[in-house]
Amino acid sequence: MSEKLLEELRNMSIAELTERENELREEVAKLQMQRHARRLDKSSDLGDRKKDLARVLTVKSATKSAGSEGAG
C-alpha cells in the first residue's frame, strides 16, 4: 500500500504536497488530542498518519532538491 501512496505523492506538485502536509498535520493534532482525552478508537491511526506525514515531507524534500539541481 505504501508503494502506491509513494507513487501518488511523487506525481504531485510542491503546492499539492504542501496542502497534503497541512491536512496531515491537522489530522495528527486531532488524533493526539483524542489520545490524551482517552477517546482514540484505534491507536494505530495516529502512527499511520505520522508515517504518511513523514512520507509527504520526504517526497517534498526530494522534489525540491531535484528541482534545485536542475536549475544550477
Image (tube, rainbow, N blue to C red):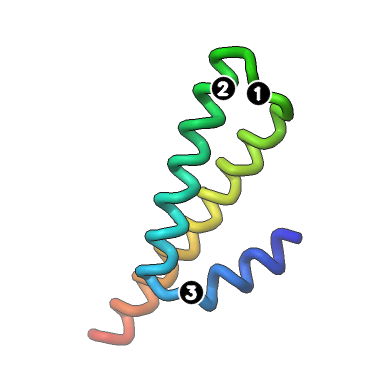
Q: Is residue 40 positioned above or below 6 on the image?
A: above
State the separation of the CA atoms marked 1 and 2: 5 Å
Question: Which residue lies at the image location 70% right of the left edge and 27% below the top edge?
Answer: 43
Reading the chain from its start, which is encountered first: label 2 or label 3?
3
Relative to the observer, which residue lies in front, 24 or 52? 24
Reading the chain from its start, which is encountered first: label 1 or label 3?
3
Label 1–label 2 contact, CB within 8 A: yes
Please name the residue that numbered disc 2 is placed on.
34
Please name the residue that numbered disc 1 is placed on.
40
The image shows residue 68 at horizontal and vertical percentages of: 29, 77
Question: Which residue lies at the image location 49% right of the left edge and 64% below the top edge?
Answer: 59
- Which amino acid lies under the numbered mark 3 shown in the image of this protein? Met
- Which amino acid lies under the numbered mark 1 shown in the image of this protein? Leu
Element type at mark 1: loop
Please name the residue that numbered disc 3 is placed on.
12
Reading the chain from its start, which is encountered first: label 1 or label 2?
2
The image shows residue 53 at horizontal and vertical percentages of: 52, 49
Q: Residues within 10 Å of mark 2 (few under 14, many from 20)?
A: some
The image shows residue 35 at horizontal and vertical percentages of: 59, 20
Relative to the observer, which residue lies in front, 72 or 44? 44
The image shows residue 42 at horizontal and vertical percentages of: 73, 29
Relative to the observer, which residue lies in front, 58 or 29? 29
